[in-house]
Amino acid sequence: MASYFKFEDLKSIVPIPEPGNRSFADFFLEKVERYPRSWFVDASKDEKMYFSELVSRIRHCSSNLIKHGYKKGDTVCLMSKNCLNFTVALVASSLAHIQLSPANPVFTGQELLYQLEVSGSRSLIIANNLLSTLEEAVKVAKQKKSLILDEIFVLDLNSDTPTTIAGVTLQPFENLLQSVDDQFLQPESTLDPKNDIWLLPFSSGTTGLPKGVALTHYNLLANVWQFSQYDNFFKVGPDSTIVGVLPMYHMYGLFIYGLCFPVRGGNVVLLPEFQPVNFLMSIQKYKATHVYIVPPLALFLSKDPRVKDYDLMHVQDVVSAAAPLALESAEELADVLAEKGSKDVVIRQAWGMTELSPLATLGALNETDRSKLFGSIGDPLPMTEIKIVDLESNETVQLGDEGEICVRGPQVMQGYYKNEEATRNTIDEEGWLHSGDIGRHVNSQFLITDRLKELIKTKGHQVAPAELEGILLTHPSVQDCCVFGLPHSSLGEAPSAAVVLRPGTPHATVTDTQLSSFVASRVAPYKQLAGGIRFIDLIPKTASGKILRRVLRARYL
């Protein structure tokens, strides 16, 4: 029997609504308006926004974007930690028929500039405390004679905020929430939701530098529907509360907190970042029923001694994603939560990627086999096909054999933004997206066993080796290098490097600490070489010149 699978319970499939010419936001608002008393809370400020106000803000923000001249095809970049207005800007962009590109708030100026340029962003919505990053990007842009922004909107602008950057006047984001002549403006364009792009998150894909992932309105409508409309995957209502600690610039956090919970009327507690005590205190204070996390947070909840001081008894559903969670870790977490009073808690894993909008598989809530629920990535979502193919022949492997996981379904991205070659290398002619993850299906379980792709996963973040290698190679003493991931107890994987120094460079004059600092000054914290640097004489490569990362990784395991 070949390794080909799809959602089995055909009788329970509810067709995805045919969108016509409606945006994702039209679907979202139709759902959210049913729950006017559900809410978002910014736990860092203890500010609450009811869904009735959320809807109003979204409609006003969209109207003002249209009034400012934004139209279909324009891109706005959003750079902020989790906050109440993140979902406002997110959904308003859909309603206005414009593209939104969320950027990592810990980016350096150089990284922000890269995303602004590749996405073709016309304007930027940015948190006040991140303006120094924009100023850094402007300095780099001046050298390259690039970066043209029409407008800059600042979240939480205050009296200490500069009035202009790069000749552009800074406007408070709140200006976009004002009434527009006592009416809600509509976009002039006619939308084609199955082909028009809404979101442009960035991902490195299976290899290379970060690329814009073109997700259409229908991609998100389909994936939200595939997940949120099935109680066996997502049992949420107005009495449900989730603590949102995952960053919303990342598709995992954006999808769960910004889209799925609201359409089912679930309440969302937002945290701007992970701080152990604040995380635990929020779970206790708001009686959180759902916790969606990454493996390092699962380890924190199962091992940190501070957990015993907090009441977690209301937690019913824990989902771990973005990297594999070991069966033993899941069992340990279940035992800890049971001791805290959450005796019926379900712990399960999900799998997907940005290119899948982002979800493809998930453990079912009614799964009774604890080893299957804890140890595997679950089952395909409705209307999702999965096959496992041989790495060499690309033929479907036999049941139980290992191969690359491929996915086909309505959530598969349109492609990489303005990058046809990268798209062709990822989505084949039959519509199968090649994930780069290696796995197998055995004993009715999907297991992730390895990664074909070069990406390093650190605390749920993607790190592209090519990006770090490019930085290392700008150092005057570096001849060649290879970046790879090594297992790390708290990070999951730590970016590590093997470096060949230029001929005649004494090792004593260039240290691993110096090179690590060189890289650290140019990248976000999670991209730093926490796994260390090794000096070697030669980088192993194939005859065609491709770096053999797996060889080096195996050498230093």
Image (cartoon, rainbow, N blue to C red):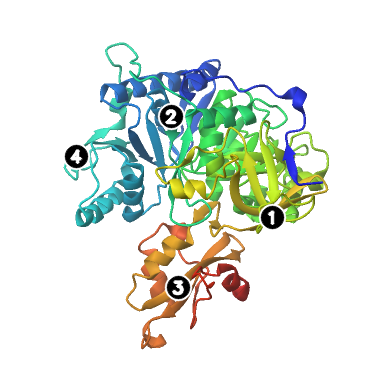
Q: In 3D space, how far apart are the residues under numbered discs 2 and 4 (Cα atoms)?
A: 29 Å
The secondary structure type at the circle numbered 2 is loop
Q: Are marks 2 and 4 in contact (CB under 8 Å)?
A: no
Amino acid carrying mark 1 in the image? Asp
Q: For residue 168, which numbered disc appears in the image?
A: 4
Name the residue that disc number 1 marks. 390
Q: Nearer the viewer, mark 4 or mark 1?
A: 1
Q: Which residue lies at the image location 55% right of the left edge and 68% below the top edge?
A: 549
Q: Are marks 2 and 3 in contact (CB under 8 Å)?
A: no
Q: Are marks 3 and 4 in contact (CB under 8 Å)?
A: no
In the image, residue 92 lies at what x, y percent?
Answer: 40, 26
Q: Nearer the viewer, mark 2 or mark 4?
A: 2
Q: Earlier in the sequence, mark 3 or mark 4?
A: 4
Q: Estimate how packed mark 2 is, as few (under 14), some (14 to 19) or many (20 or more) residues with alpha carbons within 10 Å.
A: many
Q: Earlier in the sequence, mark 2 or mark 3?
A: 2
The secondary structure type at the circle numbered 4 is strand
Q: In 3D space, how far apart are the residues under numbered discs 3 and 1 (Cα atoms)?
A: 30 Å
Q: Nearer the viewer, mark 2 or mark 3?
A: 2
Q: Earlier in the sequence, mark 1 or mark 2?
A: 2
Name the residue that disc number 2 marks. 196
Name the residue that disc number 3 marks. 481
- Front residue of 222/427: it is 427
In the image, residue 319 lies at what x, y percent?
Answer: 66, 42
Place residue 450 in its image quadrant.
Answer: bottom right
The secondary structure type at the circle numbered 3 is strand
Give left or right: position of 237 versus 175: right
Q: Nearer the viewer, mark 1 or mark 2?
A: 1
Q: In 3D space, how far apart are the residues under numbered discs 4 and 1 (Cα atoms)?
A: 53 Å
Q: Estimate how packed mark 4 is, as few (under 14), some (14 to 19) or many (20 or more) residues with alpha carbons within 10 Å.
A: few
